[in-house]
Image (cartoon, rainbow, N blue to C red):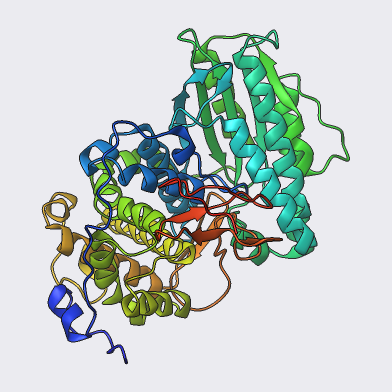
Amino acid sequence: MEVLAPPEQTFIDLEFAAMIEVDLLDLDVFNVELQDIPDMVLDVAPEAEIYGRSLGTIRKLGTLMLFRPLVETVASPEAAQAKVEFFTSVEEGFGTDMELGGGLEVRDYDNREIIDGRVMAKDLKTPISEMTESGLICAEATLAIDERFRPQYVRSEWDHHNALIVDKMARGETGYNTRIIVSPFPDEAATDSGDEYWRNIGYVPHLKRGFVQLYHVNENGKLLSGSLSFDGSKKEKIKEVLGTYGVDIPEDETTDNFLKYAYIGTISEENAKYIATDIADKSKAERSEPVTNTVDVTLKYRPLLERVFNESYVHLCESLVRGYQTEGVQNLVLQLYSYASSFRNRYSQSLNGMLRNMNSFTSDDSIVLHELLVYSTIEMMRSLHLGTTSNVYNTFSESYTADEISELDEGAFQNILGGFGADGANSNRTYSACGLSISAGGEGNPQGAFGDIDGGEDMFGSLDFQCNNGHWNRRQRNTLMANCLICGDSVKC
């Protein structure tokens, strides 16, 4: 069967599916009635994960969707974690725009629950220190096949070490309630391996962007975390600024090891924010033009981001667990495919493949849709911020406001979202966020995996497999499973 070239119309509906001879699936495959979901079913995160592009987070939310209605699922802690990772990718990516990035900065604060003496992710089940441990495992596996990754491996070691100390601080074992560290741009590594390599794994070479990380246990017994960016990162300046707060970094220390030096103290939340902001402001290069906080822009367009998540993103989560395309993913793919000629080959070919076989949905498919949704959402937010929605590629000749876009029905909303993505692809814009570099246009080699190493395989074969009833499961690396996580049937060979 040949798949026809994308038609000229800008809105794709189910008639287009019929035109290319794609049969829609009977979606009523699972009829599960469970009052509660066992923890073992939700605990399906891969061993190798990276925050912001975690297949484990996607699988947990997708598994929940097997047993609960959509309205209940999107209000769950599992959805909160997936949403914060998706929103963070959009927020940070927007701040790395090659044209706008210099006028944008990140000033983001969030409260985290502390349960059993450990700081928790938004799902209230996963400790942050377990996530950093998984990130370290992923970094170790990447280093085994790419020596250029060593500086990032060192940083992952310090990230995990810091997370363990923050847990101790949360338990009151450190004698202080505030910890502030600085993660500079990897100057030495970029010099050795080149800016392109570090851009492709999520750094921002053209801005030399670094981050101040704040951790403070407040009076409510929660952890306040802060992420504050600064551009024009220079080692000597950072050491000088930290020195004013009693943090002495040796003269010959590399930027990768800056993360082991921390400001610590017992202070108020207000003072903790002041010190973190002061360090970030004094570490950045001087600028004459005003700077906008990306968090403020994200907040302004939050209803649109919520729509992307609730109407599109959740469906890829469910499809990944089911192993086939749900109706929600089918419709999303059809809308994005109308712009396939604008996207780089990796995306256009993947969308083509999804149209050819709606009975399948793999980890690679979920990664492609994740990246396209993040990229297109950044482009939508960028266009609204600049007031250039009338330039959306091949979509609308008139300018649309955020309110007008929000009033579109689901199909039209997904279609114009794809149009924003196509506009960015045609302009070859690239964004970096959460260990991920995304460029939907042109060709090249942006990061294209979530944390799965060696294509999701280990010594026993594929990590993803189906039981005899067709339910998709995922093993932890180098570990065999006895029973299906969905139905409980034996999966032993």
Left or right position of 484 against 326: right
Q: Residue at horizontal 42%, vertical 80%? A: 349
Q: Quadrant of residue 336?
A: bottom left
Q: Residue at horizontal 56%, vertical 67%? A: 446
Q: Residue at horizontal 34%, vertical 53%? A: 318
Left or right position of 483 against 395: right
| Residue 155 position within the rendered picture, expressed as x and y whole percent measured from the top left | 72, 43
| Residue 357 position within the rendered picture, expressed as x and y whole percent measured from the top left | 35, 76
185 over 470 or under it: above or below: above
Left or right position of 70 against 481: left
| Residue 267 position within the rendered picture, expressed as x and y whole percent measured from the top left | 59, 9
- Near-viewer residue (332 or 489): 489
Quadrant where the C terminus is found in the figure: bottom right
Q: Quadrant of residue 462?
A: bottom right
| Residue 413 position within the rendered picture, expressed as x and y whole percent measured from the top left | 19, 60
Left or right position of 179 against 318: right
- Near-viewer residue (68 or 231): 68
- Near-viewer residue (237 or 379): 379
Q: Quadrant of residue 161?
A: top right
424 over 261 or under it: above or below: below
